[in-house]
């Protein structure tokens, strides 16, 4: 049940508030810069604050599928740029402990119409917005106090400032959500899986493809990236929610070593290379379920509001669509945030829930809890290409990704 006690001091004006113009966005990964892009196009003044000292490089591959995702990218004028940066990854092979391919999954099952590295996506979005958006790196919001005319915001390092609206686009572990709505455990449903990803050498000589090795409760995958000049290593393991500091990289790497040492195939080699990786990232896999995404002048966007989980393949596309709709509704309502936030949620609620369903059940398929189930799943993948309905999973994902009718909010055509 959602907390109904505001964590902001709020005063309802007796008269209509002036139209919103200045917007603080917390988070500079995907949803935040995408929102800044559209807000600027509609005449708003966005500011993005990001806790990290710079754009985060690396990360796993993210994909877009269906016309809703591609339409937003096309309207932003960045579709061709993203296509130039696409991974081009083909099928994924499941291997045995000796590295011999035992099953092959088609690219459309996990890569959609367009797959890019998350770091490349973040860079392209930043480049598309940096000329008209103020970016503040290395800082974070510490308090939000709302009154009749706006929100008073304090920061860890910077001086206090006022904004008309605040948007939490700061991911699964949203700090903004915590300040306004309450503790994370009220809204984040842990799916029983943790994951780690980092860049490593393409020592297997993979040519726009990947290999995955599954054992009971564990999965290790390696796929080539950046024209086969490097590779991404991904570790998944089944586990209840862990009480682990998200900023303690050394502790995370030690835990991963304990879980995967002696696991077989390339596990030990990759664990050794992990210590030298420039972009190690570790996190739990979870979904966000909330009854409402706004409170007063504060609204949530992307994973902060409706994360479908990193295993769904829907998160980045959903965030970009959400940014397009939120900015468009603010423009259509002429800055009336109450009307805009209500319409934003009405437009996005069913779509987000459909995308979230794609994450349900995927965790157990990725890392089955027993040796028997892992073996059965490996055998199923081996015969799957010969079974009727083998393309059903990809079709279901595409149907969920396209299940929204995008309004034309009459923004000026992109010039990039």
Image (tube, rainbow, N blue to C red):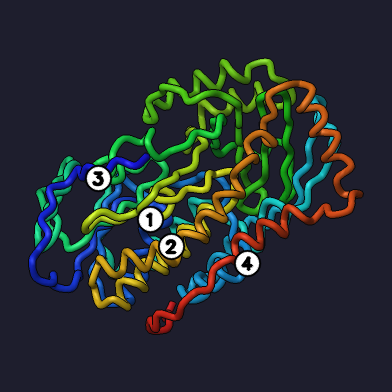
Q: Are marks 4 and 3 in contact (CB under 8 Å)?
A: no
Residue 211 x/y as whole percent: 74, 39
For label 2, the residue is 322
Tag 3, which secondary structure? helix
Residue labelled with disc 3? 180
Q: Residue sitting at 48 percent across and 34 percent down? A: 283
Q: Mark 1 or 3 closer to N-term?
A: 3
Sequence-wise first label, 4 or 1: 4
CA–CA distance in space, label 1 to label 2:
7 Å
Q: Report the residue marked by disc 4.
A: 66
Residue 282 locus on image (x, y percent): 48, 33
Closer to the camera in the image, 154 or 339: 339
Callout 2 environment at 10 Å: few (<14), some (14 to 19), or many (20+)? many
Q: Is residue 36 above or below residue 196?
A: below
For marks 1 and 2, the one nearer the N-term is: 1
Q: Earlier in the sequence, mark 4 or mark 2?
A: 4
Name the residue tied to disc 1. Answer: 301
Quadrant of the drawing holding the N terminus: top left
Q: Could you say where residue 320 lies in the image, as x and y percent from the top left?
A: 46, 62
Look at 41% across and 22% down and name the residue there. Answer: 243
Asked which secondary structure carries label 1, the reply is loop
Please report contact status of discs 1 and 2: CB closer than 8 Å, yes or no. Answer: yes
The numbered mark, 4 or 3, whose residue comes first in the sequence reads 4
Q: Dot 4, crowdedness within 10 Å: few (<14), some or many (≥20)?
A: some
Mark sitting earlier along the chain (3/2)? 3
For marks 4 and 3, give the CA distance: 34 Å
């Amino acid at each position: 049940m959602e907390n109904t006690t505001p964590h902001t001091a709020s005063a309802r004006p007796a008269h209509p508030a002036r139209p919103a113009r200045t917007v603080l966005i917390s988070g500079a990964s995907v949803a935040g810069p995408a929102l800044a892009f559209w807000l600027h196009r509609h005449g708003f003044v966005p500011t993005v604050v990001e806790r990290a000292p710079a754009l985060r490089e690396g990360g796993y591959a993210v994909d877009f599928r269906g016309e809703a995702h591609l339409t937003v990218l096309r309207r932003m004028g960045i579709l061709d740029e993203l296509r130039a940066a696409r991974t081009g990854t083909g099928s994924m092979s499941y291997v045995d402990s000796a590295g011999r391919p035992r099953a092959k999954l088609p690219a459309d099952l996990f890569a959609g119409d367009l797959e890019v590295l998350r770091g490349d996506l973040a860079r392209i979005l930043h480049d598309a917005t940096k000329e008209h958006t103020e970016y503040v790196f290395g800082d974070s919001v510490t308090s939000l106090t709302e009154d009749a005319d706006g929100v008073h915001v304090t920061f860890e390092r910077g001086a206090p400032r006022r904004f008309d609206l605040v948007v939490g686009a700061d991911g699964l572990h949203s700090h903004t959500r915590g300040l306004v709505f309450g503790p994370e455990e009220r809204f984040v449903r842990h799916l029983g899986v943790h994951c780690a990803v980092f860049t490593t050498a393409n020592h297997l000589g993979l040519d726009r493809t990947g290999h995955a090795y599954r054992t009971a409760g564990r999965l290790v995958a390696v796929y080539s990236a950046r024209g086969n000049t490097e590779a991404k290593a991904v570790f998944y393991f089944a586990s209840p929610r862990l009480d682990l500091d998200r900023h303690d990289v050394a502790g995370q790497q030690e835990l991963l070593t304990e879980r995967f040492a002696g696991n077989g195939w390339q596990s030990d080699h990759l664990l050794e290379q992990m210590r030298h990786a420039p972009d190690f990232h570790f996190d739990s896999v979870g979904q966000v379920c909330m009854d409402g995404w706004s409170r007063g002048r504060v609204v949530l966007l992307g994973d902060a509001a409706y994360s479908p989980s990193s295993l769904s393949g829907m998160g980045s596309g959903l965030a970009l669509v959400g940014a397009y709709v939120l900015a468009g509704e603010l423009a259509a309502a002429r800055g009336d945030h109450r009307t805009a936030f209500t319409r934003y949620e009405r437009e996005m609620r069913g779509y987000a829930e459909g995308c979230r369903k794609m994450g349900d059940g995927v965790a157990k398929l990725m890392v089955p809890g027993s040796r028997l189930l892992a073996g059965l799943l490996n055998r199923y993948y081996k015969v799957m290409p010969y079974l009727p309905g083998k393309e059903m999973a990809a079709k279901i994902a595409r149907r969920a990704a396209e299940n929204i009718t995008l309004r034309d909010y009459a923004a000026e055509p992109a010039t990039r």
